[in-house]
Image (tube, grey):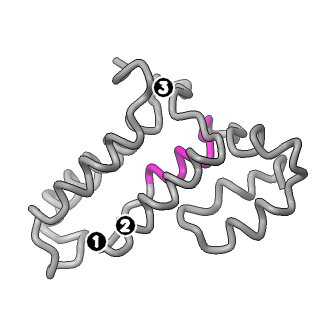
Amino acid sequence: IRKAFVLHCFRLNVLFDALFDLVPANERKAAINEVDFGGCTPLFTAAQSVPDDIAQATEQYKFVEKLLKLGADKNYVDFKGLTALGMYRTTLQSVDISTALLNSHWRDEEDDDADWDPIHVRMEDLLMPAGGETE
C-alpha cells in the first residue's frame, strides 16, 4: 500500500480508512507522509482537490483535518518550494484563471462567492505551516 502510493489516490474520506487500516501500525506515520514520484504527499493530494460545492468543500476540510491528526506534515516543502498551503492556493488560482478564460463556472452556481470565503479562510488556517507562509 505504501509503495503503490494508494493513500495518495484519496482526496476525500471514501475508502481511506479501510486502506489506512491495512498499513501496519508502526508504518502509518511514514505512510501518511510518503512522497510519491511527483513529490506529493497525501496531504498535497487532498489540498489540490477542487470541490464543486460547499458540501464537498466541507468534506475536503474534514479530510485534510483528519490527515493532520494522523500525523501529516504540513511543513513539508516539495521540489517547487510549495507546502500543502501553497498547493491549495496554486490550485485555486489556476481554477480561477481557467474559469475566467472559459467564461464558465467551476462551482455550483447556487453557491454565492461570499459563501466560499469562510471556507477558504478555514482551509488556509488549517494548512498554514508552523513557521508561517513559505516564499
Disc 3 or disc 2, which is closer to the eye?
Answer: 2
How crowded is the residue under tag 3: few (<14 C-alpha within 10 Å), some, or many (20+)? Answer: few
Residue bearing the label numbered 1? 54
Q: Position of residue 75 (x, y in %)?
A: 52, 27
Q: Is residue 2 above or below residue 35?
A: below
Q: Quadrant of the C terminus?
A: top left
Q: Is residue 114 left or right of residue 14?
A: left
Please name the amino acid that badge 2 sits on: Thr
Residue toward you, 74 or 50: 74
Question: Number of callouts in the render?
Answer: 3
> Which SS type dominates the magenta stretch?
helix
Q: Is residue 100 above or below residue 122?
A: below
Q: Residue furthest front?
A: 69
Amino acid at the residue labelled 1 = Ile
Q: Secondary structure at mark 1?
A: helix
> Are the residues flagged by discs 3 and 1 in contact, CB closer than 8 Å?
no
The residue nearer to you, when weighing 66 against 39, is 66
Q: Label 2: few (<14), some or many (≥20) within 10 Å?
A: some
**Could you classify mark 1 by the number of other residues whose Cα lies within 10 Å: few (under 14), some (14-19), or many (20 or more)?**
some
Report the residue at 34% width, 49% height from top: 123
Q: Label 3: state its secondary structure.
A: loop
- The residue to which callout 2 is attached is 58
Magenta residue span: 39-48
Looking at the picture, how far across and down is residue 112, in whole percent?
A: 10, 71
**Whether label 2 touches label 1, CB < 8 Å:** yes
Residue 114 within the magenta-colored segment of the rendering: no
Residue at image x 32%, y 42%? 124
Residue drawn at the location 55% of the way across and 46% of the way down = 43
Three-letter residue code for mark 3: Lys
Q: Which residue is mark 3?
A: 80
